[in-house]
Image (tube, coloured by chain):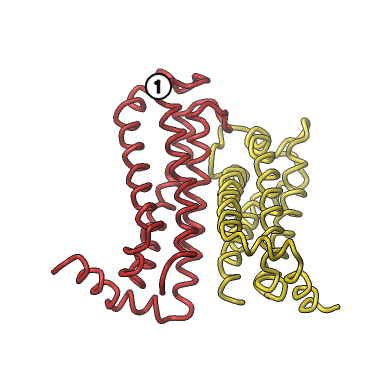
Chain colours: A yellow, B red
């Protein structure tokens, strides 16, 4: 089965039709999606700017990362849930859309980057000055921010690439 | 010149026309607008939650505000600039759009809330900056701000669904 065929089948299901028929569902889901993006931006901005040495340098990296990482994970969970609702409701809009798949790739990349570079920081014995990865921490923090920005651009541009 | 004439002039202006007729300008300006709004809401949420009583990455509300508000302001300025450009491309129809008008009202109320907070409770922030929970006036200001900004996100999205081309 091709992506096109799967998308068409999904479009015809009862749940897909229900999401489309209740006209408030998609705009509401999108709005919750955007609020969650704002949470990611806030959490990622403060964490990445701390790691880049730009913000709140009088607080330890652990303090900052520990505070915002839970918010990041929760927001990502909400983003996946709302994204799934939108995909099930309008599969034709995203499943055959190159911009959508680019966004998914970037999200995965940002997710892996966050796992690799944030979780070690949370260990009690972590010291930024002694970390083997310390040379990479700053560039990876900036890279992380750039990837999230690219994700947001892709998100809006999906609508224009249908 | 009537208000309707002015809106038409904005619509017909070189800037409005360029944004409207270019296949790429509107989507990119709109995407930047969304990025800026999510940055405003994301940073303001941290400050507002602290004002409500949820701890951030530092205890002091004053220092937290100093950390974050510069980013909020820069993002807000760019949100306004991109918003004006988007508005120009379809001035007449945006002005006639209900969610758009409500969004402007919400924006004005958020500004008013912030101004009142700044001129009153925030004046004495040194007295309560480390207090958890903060004084009631601060909690109300934070909750009002957060509520209005989340409302603006919903209204903004609703514009897209109800605007006439």
Q: Is residue A29 left or right of residue A107?
A: left
At 59% across and 51% down in the image, what residue appears?
A32
- Is A36 drawn above or below residue A23 in the view shown? above
Q: Quadrant of the C terminus of chain B?
A: bottom left
- Is B67 drawn above or below residue B9 in the view shown? above
The x and y percentages for residue B71 are 46, 47
Task: Name the residue that disc number 1 marks.
Answer: B126
Q: Is residue B99 left or right of residue A152?
A: left
At 44% across and 61% down in the image, what residue appears?
B159
Front-lying residue, A66 or B88: B88
- Is A71 drawn above or below residue A33 in the view shown? above
The x and y percentages for residue A122 are 74, 36
Total count of labels? 1
Front-lying residue, B159 or A155: B159
Chain of the residue under the numbered disc 1 shown in the image: B
Front-lying residue, A13 or A53: A13
Q: Residue furthest left?
A: B1
The x and y percentages for residue A108 are 74, 59
At 62% across and 36% down in the image, what residue appears?
A64
- Is A97 drawn above or below residue A109 in the view shown? below
Q: Quadrant of the N terminus of chain B?
A: bottom left
Q: Is residue A120 left or right of residue B60?
A: right
- Quadrant of the image occupied by residue B86: bottom left
- Quadrant of the image occupied by residue B14: bottom left
Label 1's element?
helix
Front-lying residue, A34 or B29: A34
Q: Residue furthest right?
A: A1
10 Å crowding of disc 1: few (<14), some (14-19), many (20+): few
């Amino acid at each position: 089965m091709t992506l096109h065929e799967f998308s068409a089948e999904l479009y015809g299901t009862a749940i897909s039709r229900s999401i489309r028929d209740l006209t408030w569902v998609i705009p509401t889901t999108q709005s919750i999606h955007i609020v969650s993006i704002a949470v990611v931006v806030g959490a990622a901005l403060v964490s990445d700017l701390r790691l880049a040495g730009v913000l709140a340098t009088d607080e330890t990296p652990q303090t900052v990362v520990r505070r915002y990482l839970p918010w990041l994970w929760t927001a990502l969970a909400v983003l996946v849930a709302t994204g799934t609702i939108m995909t099930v409701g309008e599969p034709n809009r995203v499943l055959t859309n190159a911009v959508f798949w680019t966004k998914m790739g970037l999200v995965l990349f940002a997710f892996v980057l966050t796992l690799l570079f944030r979780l070690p920081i949370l260990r009690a014995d972590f010291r930024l000055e002694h970390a083997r990865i310390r040379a990479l921490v700053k560039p990876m923090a900036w890279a992380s921010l750039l990837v999230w920005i690219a994700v947001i651009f892709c998100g809006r541009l999906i609508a224009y690439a249908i | 010149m009537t208000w309707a004439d002015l809106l038409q002039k904005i619509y017909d202006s070189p800037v409005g026309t360029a944004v409207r007729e270019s296949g790429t300008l509107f989507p990119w300006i709109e995407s930047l607008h969304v990025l800026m709004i999510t940055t405003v809401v994301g940073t303001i949420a941290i400050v507002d939650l602290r004002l409500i009583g949820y701890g951030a990455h530092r205890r002091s509300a004053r220092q937290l505000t100093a950390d974050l508000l510069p980013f909020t302001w820069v993002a807000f300025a760019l949100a306004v600039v991109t918003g004006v450009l988007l508005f120009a491309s379809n001035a007449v129809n945006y002005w006639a759009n209900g969610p758009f008008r409500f969004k402007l009202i919400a924006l004005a109320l958020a500004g008013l809330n912030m101004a009142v907070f700044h001129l009153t409770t925030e004046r004495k922030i040194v007295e309560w900056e480390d207090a958890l929970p903060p004084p009631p006036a601060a909690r109300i200001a934070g909750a009002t701000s957060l509520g209005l900004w989340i409302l603006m996100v919903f209204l903004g999205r609703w514009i897209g669904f109800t605007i006439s081309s």
